[in-house]
Amino acid sequence: MDVNGVFDITVVSAYGVIQCDRGGKSDPYCIVSIDDVELFQTDVAKKTLSPVWNARKQVHIAANGLADGEMIDFTMYDHDKFTRDDCMGIVSLSVAEIARGAEIGTTHMLGSRPLPHKDKVTGSITLEIKYTPGPAPDSCTKWHFSNGKFRPGPL
């Protein structure tokens, strides 16, 4: 599938996420990425199990012959000051399916990362994603797929 358009991505909120810190709360944030390349991240929401971010980013993606297996990952972490941040769950959505109009304003259950990770996961994340075919506006971050890799800049 060929993709050439703007993905308007909003990480709205999460609900019922796992408690990772003493006191029964967490400090969650979400990283949005493709092929382990970070597109953006939300702010850290302090001491909550139901964070609200409303973090929005417009990303232009261009790809000729995009494989259906290319995914946008939404990985939630608990921020820790003195230790490595804990993974709280992940949702992976197909770039091609989003471009076909499959994902707009939906809530997804958080899942675990593939083995060998042993994440403890609860809760859901709400996302709003809109795909608009066409060239990138100046205000948009530009990315492309080349030789099977996700790279910054226009195609």
Image (cartoon, rainbow, N blue to C red):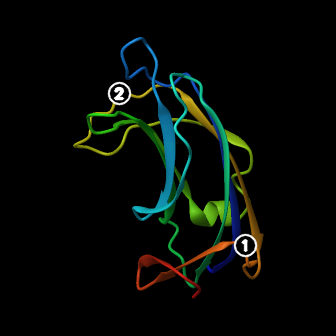
| Residue at screen point 55% across, 82% down | 153
At mark 2, the secondary structure is: loop
| Within-10-Å neighbours for mark 1: few <14, some 14–19, many 20+ | few
Tell me: residue 107, above or below residue 67: above
Spot occupied by residue 6 in the image (x, y as percentages of width and height): 71, 70
Classed neighbour count for the residue bearing mark 2: other residues with Cα under 10 Å, few (<14), some (14–19), many (≥20): some
Q: Which mark is residue 139?
A: 1
Q: Earlier in the sequence, mark 1 or mark 2?
A: 2
Viewer-proximal residue, 96 or 21?
21
Which residue is at a point 41% across and 85% down the rendered structure image?
Answer: 147
Answer left or right for 112 relative to 105.
left
Q: Work out whether residue 120 or residue 20 is closer to the camera in this orientation and state it.
A: 20
Of badges 1 and 2, the one in the foreground is 1
Q: Amino acid at mark 2?
A: Lys
Q: Image quadrant for the C terminus?
A: bottom right
Residue closest to the eye, 140 or 65? 140
**Three-letter code, disc 1:** Ser
Mark 1: secondary structure: loop
Query: Residue 43 at x, y = what percent?
Result: 55, 43
Q: Depth check: 16 or 52 in front?
A: 52
Quadrant assignment for the N terminus: bottom right
- Does residue 1 lie above or below 80 as drawn? below
Q: Among all residues in the image, which is located at the extreme top?
A: 23
Q: Residue at x 53, y 22 (%)?
A: 49
Q: Which residue is mark 2?
A: 120
Q: Position of residue 154 (x, y in %)?
A: 59, 85
Marking on residue 94: none
